[in-house]
Amino acid sequence: MISHSNGSNKIEEGHGHNGISRSLPWWTWIAPLFIANIGTWLSLWFKTDPGISLWYLPTALGIVMVYWWGPRALLGIYLNALLCAPLWDLPWKWSFLYALPETIEVGLSWFLFVKLMQKRFWLPDLANTAQFLLFGSLVPAAFANVYLVLQLLLLGDIVLSTLWNNWILLFSADLATHFVLAVPMLILFTKPVAEKGWARTDSEVIRLPLLPDGRNSKTDFILILLVFILIFFMVIFTSIHDYWIVYGLLMIILAIRYGVNIAIIASSWAGALALLLPPIMKNQLGLPTAAYTNVFIFNLEILFLCAVSLLIGRAISDLFTEISERKQAEQALRENEEKYRALFETANDAIILMDKVSTKIINANQTACVLYGYTLDEILHLKASDLTAEEQATEDAIRAGVVRVPLRYHKKKDGTVFPVEISTATFLFAERIIQVGFVRDITERKQAEQERERYVDELNRRNTELVQFTYTVSHDLRNPLVTIKGFLGMLEKDLKDNRQDKVQHDFRRIANAADKMDELLADLLELSRIGRIINPTEKIDLVQLAKDAVEMLDARIKASNVTIKVSADLPDIYGDRLRLREVLENLIDNAAKYTGQQLRPLIEIGVRNSENEQVIFVEDNGLGVEPQYQSKIFDLFEKLNPNSEGTGIGLALVKRIIEVHGGKIWVESEGLGKGSTFCFTIPDGRRASKQEVT
């Protein structure tokens, strides 16, 4: 496995992805021998003296192979030099020594640049490129060729007078092949080779496109082609030495406009043509080194053009890359800002950002503005404490860094207080501690919880009532049945005894018991309908409704000699007209029934204000209700006087109707003989304005 950490390379065996190769094919052990051999045969065309060539390819190819495949390539390079020594007119017996210089040059290049300096050999930036030219090319070539010419001198293959010229030729030729062949191969072909798993790399190899974006039109291709053709004819008809400024200008133009890829291709094209075509065209191949007196200057000119175009192209490509990355970063930033803004503005919850130290609000989304009733400009002038109805608790939570507050009460611009749930997060931005709060209005949830609790309480009450109802019904229905059964036995006996007077009495008692049961069942049926069968809600004139109830009870009122007073201030209310009339009828009938010993019984129907609500009451001066019975009388079948008429369901029925309307009912009395006041509320009860349209 090859890993890169803190600028260091670590090579292990394995297999990876994204161009990071962990293992190499078996053939990379033997391929260097054959590739170097091909380079040797091509270089033999340009041989000058024994062991010396104008154009020596194995070292350039060797640098590429050792960078891709590691030190294993050195074996093939050495064997090739060993086997080919006689082809260079060198004695076979010393071939093991003649094979060392190029092996040393290639190995030293790998050791200095890859192993020691741990640089990336596909030259991804200007720094890597410049360091390769120095430590991967110049230093190894200089050292290896010093060793080579000294060895040739000591072994008698060259004379001392030609030592300098031979070193100059070898050194410049090696540099030329490095620039013209090794550099383009490393930059252009490392990525596809690594993707196939044929090269060891310490990270993903990123190669720039051949032509940068915006400069890859048909016109650009034609321009590049024309420059290449122009270079070809200039090499044929002119000399780089005479027109090196023109060559340099063409190289620099291509490097500046198109970057490193076209720069190295153009410099390789110009260098290869300038080095190879003149000797071939002038039939100067095979001449001794002394015949190439100007080769050093010529090679330096080629090397200078190649180096300048390479470095400028690399710098331009780095600039292109930096600009492209910056544009991508800016685009990514814009996209992230748009996503954030869309999320921020479309969130269902209110989102508020504030400076945690000062608690000043620095941003808020539209949901927050709508929730609190402020414009964005207004809310940005507020602090967190301006939005809360629990200022101290809010300050304590912010100071303590509480991340979730399940219940807090906030206030709107108009002063309305409402419950919220808050989640918070804190982050550092521009040396400020920013706290973001996600505020959710839980008014509906709290209402639902309250409604649920109300339903639970109602269910518990109904269950309790049902138990009582079951017991009471079974008891109260049993009484008439017992009466009927008892008098049926007596009727049978009286019929046998032929006692006609008793028979009539028995029939009356049985009929009365049956009527009692019928009345009880009718009242129970009426009670069960309340809340289940609802008439349409309408606006009700309570004064008229009270008069209608009094009229329905006219016989009872006259029989009891009761005086009725209906207040003219009774409000208009909203509800079920028939059911609310039943309420008044039951309360008036109840009051008329229990007048006691009053000589002038009086029932008054009126209204009073209490704690911002209107209380409707039916007041009498009759028997009154002792405190211990004031809540009990609204239960089923509860009668203070068991012998009084009725089933004991009336007040339970009244209570059910009032509760169905969302109101409440109670009785006020100072005790026996002090009279009673039955009070109830209807939430929508209010005096309608004269202009209100029904």
Image: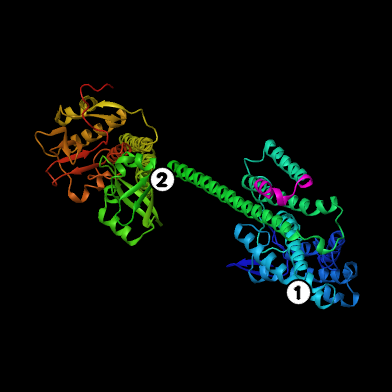
Q: Is residue 34 left or right of residue 223?
A: right
Callout 1 crowding tier (Cα within 10 Å): few <14, some 14–19, many ≥20: some
- The total number of labels drawn is 2
> Which quadrant of the rendered structure holds the N terminus?
bottom right
Residue 468 visible in the current orientation = no
Residue 362 magenta: no
Q: Position of residue 575 (x, y in %)?
A: 30, 30
Q: Which residue is denoted by mark 1 in the rendering? A: 147
Residue 240 magenta: yes
Q: Position of residue 481 (x, y in %)?
A: 38, 42
Q: Which residue is denoted by mark 2 in the rendering? A: 349
Callout 2 crowding tier (Cα within 10 Å): few <14, some 14–19, many ≥20: many
**Colour mode?**
rainbow
Magenta: main secondary structure equals helix
Q: Quadrant of residue 634?
A: top left
Q: Position of residue 59 (x, y in %)?
A: 78, 65
Q: Is residue 649 above or below residue 552?
A: below
In the rendered structure, which disc, 2 or 1, sits on the residue that comes first in sequence? 1
Q: Nearer the viewer, residue 357 or 555?
A: 357
Looking at the image, the residue that sits furthest to the front is 161
Give the residue type at disc 2. Asp
Q: Position of residue 630 (x, y in %)?
A: 21, 47
Span colored in magenta: 235-249
Taking the spot 75% from the left edge, 72% from the top edge, the residue there is: 104
Residue 396 visible in the current orientation = yes
Q: Is residue 411 left or right of residue 56?
A: left
Taking the spot 71% from the left edge, 37% from the top edge, the residue there is: 222
Give the residue type at disc 1. Tyr
Label 2 or label 1, whichever lies nearer to me, is 1
Q: Nearer the viewer, residue 79 or 567?
A: 79
